[in-house]
Image: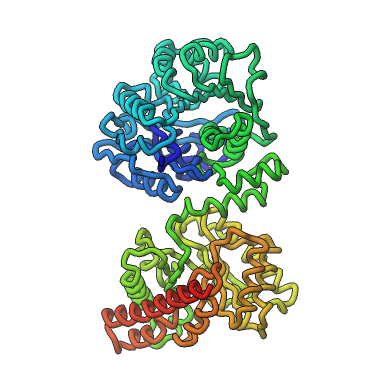
Amino acid sequence: MKTLDVITIGRSSVDLYGQQVGGRLEDMGSFAKYIGGSPTNIACGTARLGLRSAVITRVGDEHMGRFIREQLIREGVDVRGVATDPARLTALVILGIRDEDSFPLIFYRENCADMALCEDDIDEDLIAQARCVLATGTHLSNPRTEAAVMRALDMARAHGARTALDIDYRPNLWGVAGHGEGESRFVESAAVTAKLAATLHLFDLIVGTEEEFHIAGGTTDTLAALRAVRAVSDATLVCKRGAKGAVAFTGEVPDSLDDGEAGPGFPIEVFNVLGAGDGFFSGLLKGWLDGESWPRALEYANACGAFAVSRHGCTPAYPSLEELRFFLERGVTRPDLRNDAALEQIHWATNRQGRMGGDWSTMRVFAFDHRMQLEEMDGYTPAGGGAFKRLCLDAALQVQDGQGGYGILCDGRIGRAALHAASGTGLWIGRPAEWPGSRPLTLEPELGPDCGGLGEWARKNVVKVLCFCHPDDDAALRAEQEATVGRLYAAARRNGLEFLLEIIPSKVGPVDDATTATLIAQFYAAGIYPDWWKLEPLTSQAAWAKAIDAIEAHDRHTRGIVVLGLDAPEAELAASFRIAAGFDLVRGFAVGRTIFGQVARDWFAGRIDDAAAVTEMAARYRRLCTIWDHARAAAQVAA
């Protein structure tokens, strides 16, 4: 009746990863922000592999602490054990990739929140729900955190849970190396050895590198160190050997490391070793807790470590279960996994939830990203346009009322104030990148020729681009438009932004049941894999079936489709919704002028005030939401 598979306990931090590879940390100019800390990484890594995980730690009562908590939730990690410390700051780590052998890092952990973890933070009811409790070595370095770990281990054993130790030896976190030696992995210390040795009997599984077993066993002879650990512990010992993989010892330590149980390794490029051990432990736990043999569990572990070694960051590098299965079945096709297009597509698509969060299986989107249509209205001014879009946001929030499944499309030119105000409201936020009405497709000038402007976009903004295209377009036009979409798509991926592709063929040529499906297949053939598709309302079930077949033939992991409105009256939209709602991949709608068109004309002309505009738009938006929800419910009943 356990409700959790694993609880990890210990460090949590924000990792600021230098984005320039091959230089000194002193020369880094920009940083990517991720969650970090070995137990936090492992909790996320195991969650991605389908285990029910939780973490016990502390974070500060500030922005970085809230980031960790929110990101853990997005990753699917239970945060009941994450305490907020009002007196201390969240730990930070600044780190970089110099070359395949050098990974400089600085720990900012003086009196940090997670090192204030104490016995009172250990909830027995939470521990009792776990099949396994995993501790990491750093939290044995301080009497207060050690007491918390010991309490958790005692409770775990009392409630029949397995226990695991990641030795996780960082000399400077034990006070035996200086602040500038964060990269150091081994300094001999009799005091550290004695502290670790006193706890080893409490564990069923102990994992470490050769150097970590050296500190646990008190000798730099690896076999002797393993035997010293075996003398005080009956745990399975898993020794990580870098490029040689890892070996497990369930009984006596043999005369050679090669005689331990081993799993296959993977010939991959070493790009970044930071966090690889946490990825390894995540895969190992998946196999161990699923009852796999040690060779199979070590195969999972080695594969997860390989992903981490080949990618930037720690937690962001770890695989989903589907990605792991794909990799183990297909094997290595190129050693630099981060440049394996098929693997990276699965990695991106199956880990999207950790970036965006929320449940977007239903999409009720108020689209007011229109620019040209507003600019052509009588009475429009740039200031007035911005003010009106704030009213559109007010209407959207009134209908949303804190619920999931609602969103907006809003631009960053006229609607900049509304766009920024929407951040953090729980709305799904799409942002257009095209120059309105352009054909051939032209992008907003603010993006720059290489789309570098996306680097300034909020990470929860979804890049939306509208392309007026048709299967009958001549080869030159098709190539030009696909190149523009492809450039934007690549930049969106580079910046960690989801991508929505909107196609409207009916405005440029005749359409039939195969038109949209043909366009979809053409964009996939060009190497463009949108997270979202935005399609005009198709008029037949056959057209929808063909479009969906075209998507699923190329990408089983797409987020889905939203239906656009084309300024249609509500009655026409209701009819189109009834057809579209019968297909699960159609998640909802993204409609604009049907909601705001007449209201905007009246508002710019001074015929209605702000309050009336918001009231009317909210009423229209709410009616469309109800129409969609009823159509979906009817389709589900019919199915």
Q: Nearer the viewer, residue 225 or 397?
A: 225
Residue found at x 40% / y 24%: 173
Q: Nearer the viewer, residue 81 or 21?
A: 81
| 112 displayed left or right of 314 | left
Residue 398 vs 109, above or below: the answer is: below
| 506 displayed left or right of 37 | right
Residue 342 vs 615, above or below: the answer is: above
Tell me the quarter of the picture where residue 399 sits. bottom left
Q: Nearer the viewer, residue 105 or 37?
A: 37
Colour mapping: rainbow
Quarter holding the N terminus is: top left
Work out which residue is located at the far front of the displayed protein and give it.
1
Work out which residue is located at the far right of the displayed protein and give it.
475
Q: Position of residue 159 (x, y in %)?
A: 37, 31
Q: Position of residue 520 (x, y in %)?
A: 65, 69
Tell me the quarter of the picture where residue 508 sits. bottom right
Residue found at x 30% / y 33%: 122
Q: Is residue 418 visible?
A: yes
Q: Position of residue 120 (x, y in %)?
A: 26, 32
Residue 505 vs 298, above or below: the answer is: below
Q: Position of residue 514 (x, y in %)?
A: 68, 77
Residue found at x 42% / y 58%: 358
Residue 2 vs 373, above or below: the answer is: above
Q: Is residue 383 visible?
A: no
Q: How many marks?
A: 0
